[in-house]
Amino acid sequence: MIGSLGEYEFEVSSEQVKTFDGLSFSNSAAYSEHRIVGKKSLLEFTHLNPSTCSLNINLSIETGNNPDEEISALYEAMNEHQALAFTLGGGVMGEGLWVIESLEEKYTRIDNKGNILAAELGLKLKEYLDNE
């Protein structure tokens, strides 16, 4: 197994190829600006923002995937506000769990009955930290 997002596993086997590309992470800090008359403003660090992540998933029936089922599973996780562990190569990504902030779908092949044969997905994740 390459990694996982909750129960959604990324893998390459003789039956299925479910991988991602374009994996990127973004981290940022927040500062308050204190204005001083006649001088440059001073910055004060306030907090670290949650990390964000984006990745693309290509699904096709030729690679052992059912794009409609895969999309539904990811939508369910997003719509139910599930906080998911994100692993890669056995290691946990980030400091906590991740939520699916957005899911973009592009259907690249559909058959004559309206079944999705291939799709490209764009996921945006945000780090979810429990404040306890």
Image (spheres, rainbow, N blue to C red):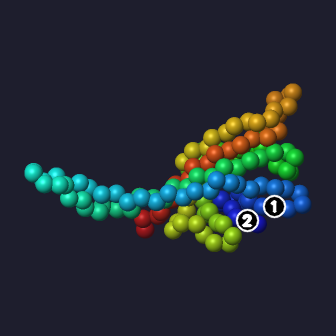
Q: Residue at x 57, y 44 (%)?
A: 102
Q: Position of residue 82 (x, y in %)?
A: 58, 54
Is 21 in front, or is 83?
21
- Farthest residue to the left: give it: 38
What number of labels is visible? 2
Q: Quadrant of residue 107?
A: top right
Classify the position of the C terminus by image quarter. bottom left
Q: Is residue 48 left or right of residue 60?
A: left
Q: Amino acid under label 1?
A: Val
Can you give x and y, in whole percent of width and height, for residue 14 in the image? 90, 60
Residue located 74% across and 59% down the image:
10
Mark 2 and mark 1 in contact (Cβ < 8 Å)? yes
C-alpha span from label 1 to label 2:
8 Å
Per the image, the residue denoted by label 1 is: 12
- Position of 61 with respect to 1 (left or right) is right
Describe residue 17's horizontal placement relative to residue 41 as left or right. right
For residue 2, the mark is 2
Looking at the picture, does residue 111 appear above or below residue 119?
A: above
- Residue at the extreme front of the image, as rendered: 39
In the rendered image, the quadrant that contains the N terminus is bottom right
108 is higher (above) or lower (below) than 42: above
Q: Residue at x 77, y 55 (%)?
A: 18
> Element at badge 2?
loop
Residue neighbourhood size for the residue with mark 2, other residues' Cα within 10 Å, grouped as few (<14), some (14–19), many (≥20): some
Residue 127 image position (x, y, % from top left): 51, 59
Q: Residue furthest bottom?
A: 90
Q: Which mark is residue 132?
A: none
The amino acid type of the residue labelled 2 equals: Ile
